[in-house]
Structures are given as structure tokens and as C-alpha cells.
Image: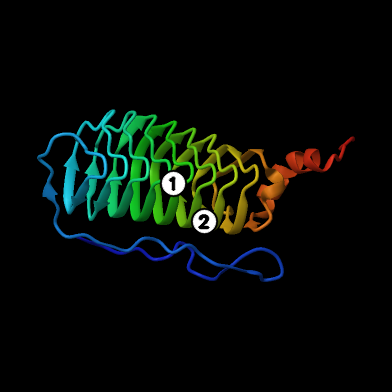
Amino acid sequence: MVRRAGSAGGAGGTGGTGGTRVKGARRPELRLPAPERYEGGGLEPDGDYDGLEFFEADLSAQDGAGARFMDCVLTGCALDEARLSRARLLDSVLAGVRGVGTDLSGAVLRDVEVTDARLGGTQVHGAELERVLIRGGKIDFLNLRSARLRDVVFESCVLVEPDFGGARLERVEFVDCALKGADLSGATLTDVDLRGAASLEIARGVDRLAGAVISTGQLLDLAPVLAGELGIRVLD
């Protein structure tokens, strides 16, 4: 199986004011060999999984902390309370995964596609995401505190109260994505393109938007929050 994807909007897309250039995110380029069906039992801490397909596997409460997934496909898997802290997911696809309380804290996701996920309370704090595409689905209360995101695209998905507190975002794009009640407290943004967000709601940390690009309409929508942050009273 061969998958290729180009940058959304293209690297070096034009945005901002005065013709300022915005560096586009690089999407993952996956060249996956045909995977073998995983026939083993549960996950193992520090396990090594190479070229495997986990098809509708129930991985709930499994302990795969520190495990390595390379050229793997997880399709329709249940990940409730799965422990994948410090795991490494490389050149892999997660399609239609679901679960509450999945622990990916301190994990590394590199060249990964996540499609049509239904997740809640996923712990990804302190993780490293590079060339990751999250497309479709809905993720509630995503915890990305102190994580590092580089070349990450959120596309056609719904993020409810995502927590980016203290995170570093570089070349991150939101494309046709609903962002509801986001927390940017203490976050650092570089070349973050929010113009494509279908809805943009920032609950905390609006003062951290330096380094992001928004549209004129989004600026008007955010005006009350920005005025409150600056201590401006608006009276008619």
C-alpha cells in the first residue's frame, strides 16, 4: 500500500498581513508494505510491532507502554484506558479507533495518519508529534499540554476543549476543523494557520496567538475575547 500526501495549502503559502509568508505543514508520506494480521494476545510493555494490522482488536486497558509500532495499521480498535505512554508510532495508520482515557503521554508519533477517530480524554501531554495528519472524527478533551507539534494537520475533525497549555506548535494547520473551547495558556506558536478552521473558540490563552495567522472574520469573532484580555471596555 502506498500513500502520498502533499502539504495542505502548500509550503510557503501566503498569509498574514503585508504578504507575510506562512510555512505550510508537511503531511506524512506513507509507503506501507502489506501488513500481516496480528494474531497475538495483548500488548506488552516495550513490545516491538512491525508491519502488523490490528483489525478491530480490543486493546482496552492493555499495557503497551514504551512499545514500538512501525509500519502498522490499527483499524476499528478499542483503546479505552490503553496504556501507550512513551510508545513510538512510526509510519503507521490509525483508522476508526475509539476509546476514552487512552494514555499516549510522552509518546512519539512520526509520519502517522489518524482518521475518523472517536476519542475522549486522550492523554498526549509531553508527546512529540511530527508529520501527523488527524482527519475526520471527534476528539473530546484532548490533553496536549507541554507537547511538541511540528508539521501537524487537523482536518475536517471536531476538537472539543483541546488543551495546548505550554505546548510548542510549529507549522500546524487547522483545515475545515471545529475548534471549541481551546486552551492555549503558555503555548508557543510558530507558523500556525487557523484560517481554515470552520469555527474558532479560544477559552484561555488568546494572548498566545502571536505566531498564528487568522482571517479577518475570525478576528472579528475573537474581538470580545481580545478586548477582555486587554482590559478594554466596549460601550455603545
Percent across and percent down for residue 227 are 80, 41
Which quadrant would residue 65 be assigned to in this image? top left
Q: Which residue is mark 1?
A: 156
| Residue 19 position within the rendered picture, expressed as x and y whole percent measured from the top left | 67, 71
Secondary structure at badge 1 equals loop
* Amino acid tagged 1: Ser
Which residue corresponds to the image point at 44% horizontal and 52% vertical from the top-left? 128
Whole-percent x, y for residue 210 in the image: 69, 55
Tell me if residue 164 comes above or below residue 131 in the rendering: above
Query: What amino acid does circle 2 point to?
Result: Val
Identify whether 141 is placed above or below 73. above
Q: Looking at the figure, which quarter contains the C terminus?
A: top right
- Label 2: which secondary element: strand
Residue for point 33% across, 35% down: 83
Q: Is residue 24 found left or right of 202 in the rendered image?
A: left
The answer to whether residue 63 is left or right of residue 7 is left
Instruction: Name the one closer to the observer, 196 or 51.
Output: 51
Q: CA distance from mark 2 to mark 1?
A: 14 Å
- Going from N to C along the chain, the mark reached first, 2 or 1, is 1
- Classify residue 205 as left or right of residue 114: right
**Viewer-nearest of labels 2 and 1?**
2
Query: In the image shown, does 31 or 187 lie closer to the viewer?
Result: 187
Residue highlighted by disc 2: 172
Q: Which mark is residue 183?
A: none
Color encoding of the figure: rainbow
Q: Nearer the viewer, residue 113 or 157?
A: 113
Residue at x 71% of width, y 70% of height: 18
Quarter of the image with the N terminus is bottom left
Q: Residue reaching furthest front?
A: 46
* 46 or 91: nearer the viewer: 46
